[in-house]
Image (cartoon, coloured by chain):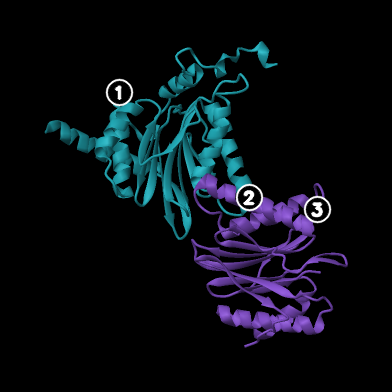
Chain colours: A cyan, B purple
Amino acid sequence: MSRRYDSRTTMFSPEGRLYQVEYAMEAIGNAGTCLGILASDGIVLACEKRITNKLLDEIFETEKLYRLSADMVCSVAGITSDANILVNELRHIAQRYQLQYQEPMPCEQLVSQLCDIKQTYTQFGGKRPFGVSLLYAGWDPHYGLQLYQSDPSGNFSGWKATCIGANNAQAMSTLESEFKEGITLEDAVPLAIKIMHKIMDQNKLTAEKLELATVTRSDDKTKMTIIPREKLEKLISEREKLAAAEKQK
Amino acid sequence: MDFCIGIRGNDFVLLCEDMNAAQSIMLHKQDHEKMLDLNDHLLMTRTGNLGDGVQCAEFLQKNIQLYQIRNGYEMRSSAAAHYIRKYLADTLRSREPLEVNLLLGAYDVISNTPQLYYMDYLGSMATAPFCAHGYGAMFATSILDMYYHPGISVDEAIGILNKCIKELKKRLIINFSKFNVKVVDKDGIHKLPTISVEDGIHTH
């Protein structure tokens, strides 16, 4: 069957590159930004929403943030329909583990297993890779709070702070200078807002266009809190005041 | 025809098994060790079919080791217990069911607690402060009911173990000559002196 289709999706170029994987990453480079910062007492995930038509009915609470299990959450950047498939698969993997071991799946194992699936699309079958990068935020008893990033190639790594989607390079360079070891959530949230404000400079940052969640641990439970709109508006206006003050200096 | 017993203290779990390897009326050997270290803090003993027991135990041991190599940390004791239980439950309704009853002694290094799991060939599981498998279990459980108390020490547990063995020698029709004893605690699995019925059973 697959010989009728172009199987070049899974073959190397003469220079040793996988073009389809690179093209997938191009697609993600045009998608809404997702930023993650691992603080000492929590993880903050900030996402730029692209779908903001006022006629849209709110069926789901969030556009880009998904809960994977009791202890893990993820944000996606890229083709939404591809992302839905991967999120569904992640949820299945997590529950299958829980069924077998009666304990929540450790973060790295979940990321690793999905990435093994993503990798097969770069090697077998003649199908295209998934046009999605994901940020994973979670907790497990082995390594505590963790932040991971994966891309269409099936590569993943753990991060202290990272960014995917549009303008991610700009965000990463800002993070490299502004991220401090041992940062707390109290400082990480305004930092995330600061960076989102900076990279969305052309299109003004409003609370409507932002989704922000924190992952914390208390009472032996992992809590995912989605920051409500009023609080976001307050944080954004504080950032704008600070930015205006810095400009005047 | 075999027998195994487990006793849990505050910071250890003691497992003891008979060392007979028998099939029907034929006694193959009397110094056969069935107990297996699944990882540094997981000890498993069994009763039932000899062949099934080996297949089951070695398969589980290798998979638990693979998990550790893949992930860099040991499988937690409760995770391992549930994994083993599910394995028994899955094989029950698939190919030839495994005719093994298990006792799993574990020390969870993250929460620093010892755990003793009792599993049977149908895939049921329970935790208990003390438990036993086999015909000998009927005698051993009564003795444990009388003498066990929470916070028992290793020496006290061995004392009760000797009482059980004395009772088995007296009242159980099956002859056991030697018993293999191991203990698991936060420092790992340790082999204790084999209890030999001929040399005399020492009750404290």
Is label 1 or label 2 in front? Answer: 2
> Does residue A69 appear in this view?
no
Q: Are marks 2 and 3 on the same chain?
A: yes
How many numbered callouts? 3
Asked if the residues shown at circle 3 and circle 1 are in contact, with their CB atoms under 8 angstroms apart, the answer is no
| Residue at image coords 36%, 36% | A162
Q: Which residue is mark 3?
A: B97
- Do the dots labelled 1 and 2 sit on one chain? no
Where is the N terminus of chain B found, in terms of image quarters? bottom right
Q: Chain of mark 2?
A: B
Q: Amino acid at mark 1?
A: Gln
Residue A111 falls left or right of residue B116: left
Question: Element under label 1?
Answer: loop
Alpha carbon of mark 2 to alpha carbon of mark 3: how far?
A: 20 Å
Chain letter for mark 3 = B
Q: Tell me if mark 2 has few (under 14), some (14-19) or many (20+) residues whose alpha carbon lies within 10 angstroms of its own.
A: few
| Viewer-proximal residue among B24 and B101 | B24
> Hey, what amino acid is under mark 2?
Lys
The residue tagged 1 is A202
Q: Earlier in the sequence, mark 2 or mark 3?
A: 2
Residue A33 found in image quarter: top left
Q: Nearer the viewer, residue A203 or B148?
A: B148
**Residue A38 position within the rendered picture, expressed as x and y whole percent measured from the top left:** 36, 44
Q: Quadrant of residue A103?
A: bottom right
Front label number (3 vs 1): 3
Give the side of residue B35 with respect to residue B96, left or right: left
Taking the image as shown, residue A247 lies to the left or right of residue B174, namely left
Q: Are marks 3 and 1 on the same chain?
A: no
Residue at the spot 57% in from the left edge and 75% down from the top edge: B9
Q: Which residue is mark 2?
A: B62
B203 shown above or below B8: below
Relative image position of residue A194 (x, y in whole percent): 28, 36
